Image (tube, grey):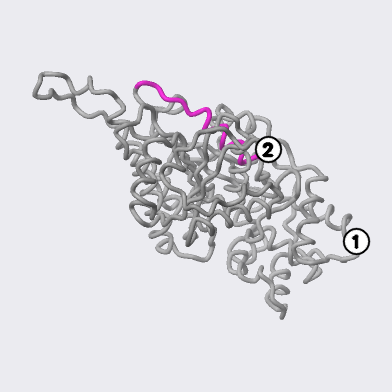
Amino acid sequence: LLTGATGALGAHILHTIRSDSSVSHIVCLVRASSPLAAHERVSKSLIARGKPGLEPFSSTPPTAEDLSFTGPKDIATSKPPVTCLPCTLSQLNLGISSAAYAHLANTTNVIIHAAWAVNFTARLRSFEKDHIAGLSHLLHLSKSSPQRTERVRFLFLSSTASVTNTPVSKYPIAENISFDPEEASPLGYSRSKWVAENICNAFHEQVFTVAPQHHDNDGSNASDVPPSTKLGPRIAILRIGQLTSDTVSGIWNTSEAYPLMLSTAPLLHALPDLGSLPLDWLPVDIAAKAVLEVADTMTTNPSGKSATNTNGCPVVHILNPLTKPTWSDLLSCIKTASPELEIEILPPKEWLARLEAYEGDVPAKKLVGLWKGAFGEGEDKVDGQDEGTRMEFGMEKAKSMSETMRGVGPLDEGFLERMWRWVEEMVGV
């Protein structure tokens, strides 16, 4: 079960799952007005990222019987069937039929919750109804069935933004729950992820609290009841770092900060000088692969606790820990690839001033406030940190659970050029 399939990471996760011969069926919960609209949104998202779209839509609305389909895969593609269900995560029943809800509760093995609004101007309260409540409702789904014989693996895709205000004295930032809300950045988005992580942890603690034994009227011990009657989910929180385009096409997410920043170059003929800022960006297809490797590695022991973490809800950092290449390397690559643009490299405050003064319609303008807070208010700040100070994240669990994370390498020149060509195409150069 996947949410967020219309987003960049969710689409790559879906694309990767479709190549997994061990998967019998994929269900995508999608914010849409109808099954056709849900199907079209997901298929368009895949195609927009250079991936094959979904199989043709069936005009018959999906039923619980459709959801239980585990028959032969499509002969031409050998891909597992994908059912897209329109949903409303803010509703306790997710806005789907009772039959569909019961079937998902009984048969889903893995839930990957990737849906979240990437809105850096919204306040925390605006995330409450659809996102924070939606997370709780999905967690409820994961423990709703008394018929289960194994625990659901529940992966919540959080963000490193939930802990980016962690004091330097605590570096490297541990793969553990943060109980201090001040460790999240001030943005509503960041704080919503911090709240969500703590909801996951509270749910984890509730599920794995051992209830006292009691005897039924017939004298039998309640612990003799098959464990399927009291199985809750196994939960993992995956903090996702800064993602970038995939390794094949260079396609990124048009709504993210760095693509928007780069898109100003052909318009302003300028980019900010961020110096030695590390391009510690993780290609989105690499991140998708790592997420699924973590899901595969999540094992269950008789107590239901994680084999990789017995102290609270497991947290895994999915990010690029490397410090090379740098922003300066990217600027050199852009100048080499597009000499005709004559791009001027400006101090961040001057670049921001030029952006604000530009009279045309520039999507990047909506992030001026964010960039002022990150590096525009002081010459000694880069990305909100004192120059020379870089956040460090522990990655022991990530590397133990994901072969991909053990092998993350630096972004090479070919990658940077593909990414830049996509930016040029996006802007219409």
Q: Is residue 254 left or right of residue 308?
A: right
Left or right, 106 with reference to 157: left
Residue reaching furthest to the bottom = 359
* Residue 12 located left or right of residue 328: left
Foreground residue among 5 and 205 = 5
Q: Is mark 1 on a helix, strand or loop?
A: helix
Residue 279 showing in the rendered view: yes
Residue 200 part of the magenta-drawn span = no
Position in image of residue 191 (x %, y %) = 45, 55
Disc on the earlier residue, 2 or 1: 2
Toward the viewer: 197 or 186?
197
Within 10 Å of disc 2 (Cα), the crowding (few <14, some 14-19, many 20+) is few
Label 2 sits on residue: 76
Q: The disc labelled 1 sits on which kind of residue?
A: Pro
* Quarter in which the C terminus is drawn: bottom right
- For the stretch drawn in magenta, the main secondary structure is helix
The part of the chain drawn in magenta is 286-302
Q: In this view, does 307 lie above or below 8?
A: above
Label 1 Cα crowd, 10 Å radius (few <14 / some 14-19 / many 20+): few
Say which of 46 and 231 sits in front. 46
Quarter holding residue 357 = bottom right
> Circle 1 sits on which residue?
339
Q: What residue type is labelled 2?
A: Ala
Q: Where is residue 158 in the image (x, y as percent from the top left)?
A: 50, 47
Mark on residue 239?
Answer: none
Provide residue 108's location: percent of width, then percent of height: 43, 37
**Residue 225 occupies quadrant:** top left
Label 2–label 1 contact, CB within 8 A: no
Q: 55 or 179, which lies in front?
A: 55
* Magenta span includes 294: yes
Q: Residue placed at 35% from the left, 46% from the top?
A: 99
